[in-house]
């Protein structure tokens, strides 16, 4: 659990982060969203003390982070940045091994961990362990960046616009992978983005920032249905808020009992996708199919629409 | 074998042949020597002179490298940034002061021989190494530095494991430049009795023997070219591993 207490950062007369308090639950993904200059990156960088707060403090599992030297703290916290910052003179394997080496792991343990991570991130160790970063595609570099951050099994992973440089298709895949990784390792992730859709897609909780202040910190659905500030609804978007709300719920979660005729949809599909299917097929109901191929119930247009408003 | 390698080997062969058996080149230089005068320098061993000159240059370059790289590191640290203008001025003075003037100033202080030459070459060689170190360290990609700190490297670990390796191609280029300039400059050391091929050139000037002047210059030039070339090859090897894209 990460607790931010009254965090502020001032540079001279400018206040970049203004008295932000929030709590990040263990094993969750928190997305910090804001326009550029909203102080979101500074807030993130105060968690691993790349920026020292002017006021307030950060607690990691209840312990003040200033109690140990900053560089030791950072070895326990994964960190991924936009552009990834891979060491260009080191191979992929050496890049991933950075923090384990700093921590003094044995060679055999490092080798095993690097291999495991390469496999998790779908990079064949044979082909990629000895490659240099410039030989990788953007998507591969991004994966190596995340693998490097996770190498020493940190409980917390901080990510600053980690998908910013990827094209839409690779980005969607990378976001999917991140959700998998998070489930697999149970890492607590704090992610900074300027993309509200990305925040909604990944964040269990979303923190909306503007001009250094925290406007709202809540579940995505609450940001849509009960925005705390006009700026929040402006950033989440008003025109398609019903569709956004629908995209936060999966068919499996709200399927009605019983069967029906109509197109089959996966239980993992969002209500927005189900609705789109119904519109496409001109049907009024869809049957929901689980991953095992067994029917899970059905959904009608009326039932779906009811989930699209507060 | 490529043409470049052939030219390199030919240059090296020529240099070694001249140094090991200077007399076999006598027929070539005879037309340039005044009648009755020896066509090949005979008041000292050319091989020893060349070796002495190379040693002087290398010692001076080692000292320049040590000081310039250390200064470059110092002024790129947050705590040393205020010394940047001062360091730059000092290093620039070393370059603007002509080595001859440095010799004139230092001889009364440290006497004749190798020492004034070493001092002059040391001062003259600082600038390229310092400026290249500075550029190399300052142009490390910010994302890479941020990642290094974010991973938990201490300032020292970051310098040794990331910044210096990334700056290495440029630092080496600075050392190469400094070395090559100084191979030529070192010949003036012979005016204050430092051992070197300058002795041959000065002997030629004093006795009006163009053959001496030419062979002294030729050997110095060959040394500089070969040194430049082999250091450039070393740099390319380093660049292959330190690839910045």
Image (cartoon, coloured by chain):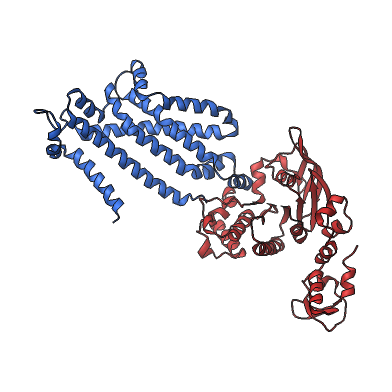
Q: Quadrant of residue B194?
A: top left
Query: Taking A266 as reference, is A130 above or below it?
Result: above
Query: Seen in the image, is B23 located left or right of residue A46?
Result: left
Q: Chain B drawn in what color?
A: blue
Q: Which of these two is toward me, A30 or A188?
A: A30
Q: How many marks?
A: 0
Report if residue A217 is visible in the image: no
Rendered location of residue A223, percent (x, y):
85, 56
Farthest top residue? B108
> Image quarter for residue B225?
top left
- In the depicted structure, whether residue B97 falls above or below residue A93: above
Question: Residue shown at 57%/57% (left/top)?
Answer: A109
- Residue lying at the far left in this picture: please name it: B36
Q: Is residue A187 visible?
A: yes
Q: Is residue A137 left or right of residue A238?
A: left
The quadrant of the picture occupied by the C terminus of chain A is bottom right
Residue at the image point whose x is 82% and y is 72% from the top: A275
x, y percent for residue B182? 35, 32
Residue B61 position, x and y percent, is: 38, 33
- The quarter holding residue B76 reads top right
Q: Which of B212/B138 is in front?
A: B212
Q: Is residue A55 above or below residue B86?
A: below
Q: Residue at x 55, y 65 (%)?
A: A124
| Residue B114 location (% of width, % of height) | 31, 25
Tell whether A7 sits left or right of B212. right
Q: Which chain is red?
A: A
Q: Considering only vertical position in the picture, is A44 above or below B192?
A: below
């Amino acid at each position: 659990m990460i607790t931010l207490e009254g965090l502020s950062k001032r540079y001279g007369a400018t206040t970049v982060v203004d008295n932000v308090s929030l709590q990040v639950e263990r094993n969750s993904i928190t997305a910090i969203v804001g326009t550029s200059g909203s102080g979101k990156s500074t807030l993130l960088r105060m968690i691993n003390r790349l920026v020292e707060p002017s006021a307030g403090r950060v607690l990691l599992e209840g312990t003040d982070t200033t109690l140990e030297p900053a560089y030791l703290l950072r070895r326990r916290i994964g960190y991924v940045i936009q552009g990834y910052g891979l060491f260009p003179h080191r191979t992929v394997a050496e890049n991933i091994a950075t923090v384990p080496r700093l921590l003094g792991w044995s060679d055999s343990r490092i080798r095993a961990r690097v291999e495991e991570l390469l496999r998790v991130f779908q990079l064949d160790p044979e082909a990629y362990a000895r490659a240099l970063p410039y030989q990788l595609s953007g998507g591969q570099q991004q994966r190596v960046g995340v693998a490097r951050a996770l190498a020493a099994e940190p409980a917390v992973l901080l990510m600053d616009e980690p998908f910013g440089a990827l094209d839409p298709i690779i980005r969607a895949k990378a976001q999917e992978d991140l959700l998998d990784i998070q489930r697999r390792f149970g890492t607590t992730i704090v992610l900074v983005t300027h993309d509200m859709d990305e925040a909604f897609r990944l964040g269990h909780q979303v923190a909306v920032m503007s001009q250094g202040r925290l406007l709202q910190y809540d579940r995505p659905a609450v940001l849509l249905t009960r925005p705390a500030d006009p700026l929040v609804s402006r950033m989440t978007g008003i025109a398609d808020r019903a569709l956004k709300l629908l995209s936060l719920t999966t068919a499996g979660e709200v399927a009605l009992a019983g069967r029906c005729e109509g197109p089959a949809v996966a239980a993992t599909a969002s209500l927005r996708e189900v609705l789109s299917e119904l519109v496409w097929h001109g049907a009024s109901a869809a049957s929901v199919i689980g991953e095992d191929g067994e029917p899970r119930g059905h959904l009608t247009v009326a039932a779906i629409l009811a989930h699209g408003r507060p | 074998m490529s043409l470049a390698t052939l030219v390199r080997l030919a240059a090296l062969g020529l240099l070694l042949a001249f140094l090991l058996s200077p007399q076999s080149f006598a027929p070539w230089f005879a037309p340039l020597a005044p009648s009755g005068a020896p066509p090949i320098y005979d008041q000292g061993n050319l091989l020893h002179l060349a070796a002495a000159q190379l040693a002087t240059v290398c010692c001076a370059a080692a000292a320049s490298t040590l000081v310039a790289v250390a200064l470059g590191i110092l002024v790129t640290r947050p705590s040393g940034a205020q010394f940047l203008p001062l360091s730059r001025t000092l290093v620039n003075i070393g370059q603007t002061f002509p080595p001859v003037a440095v010799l004139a100033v230092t001889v009364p202080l440290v006497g004749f021989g190798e020492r004034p030459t070493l001092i002059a070459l040391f001062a003259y060689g600082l600038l390229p190494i310092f400026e290249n170190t500075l550029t190399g360290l300052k142009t490390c990609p910010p994302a890479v530095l941020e990642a290094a700190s974010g991973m938990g490297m201490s300032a020292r670990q970051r310098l040794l494991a990331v910044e210096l390796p990334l700056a290495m191609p440029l630092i080496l280029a600075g050392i190469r430049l400094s070395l090559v300039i100084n191979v030529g400059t070192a010949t003036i050391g012979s005016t204050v009795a430092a051992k070197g091929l300058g002795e041959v050139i000065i002997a030629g000037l004093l006795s009006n023997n163009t053959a001496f002047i030419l062979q002294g210059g030729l050997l110095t030039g060959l040394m500089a070219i070969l040194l430049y070339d082999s250091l450039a090859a070393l740099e390319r090897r380093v660049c292959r591993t330190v690839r910045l894209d």
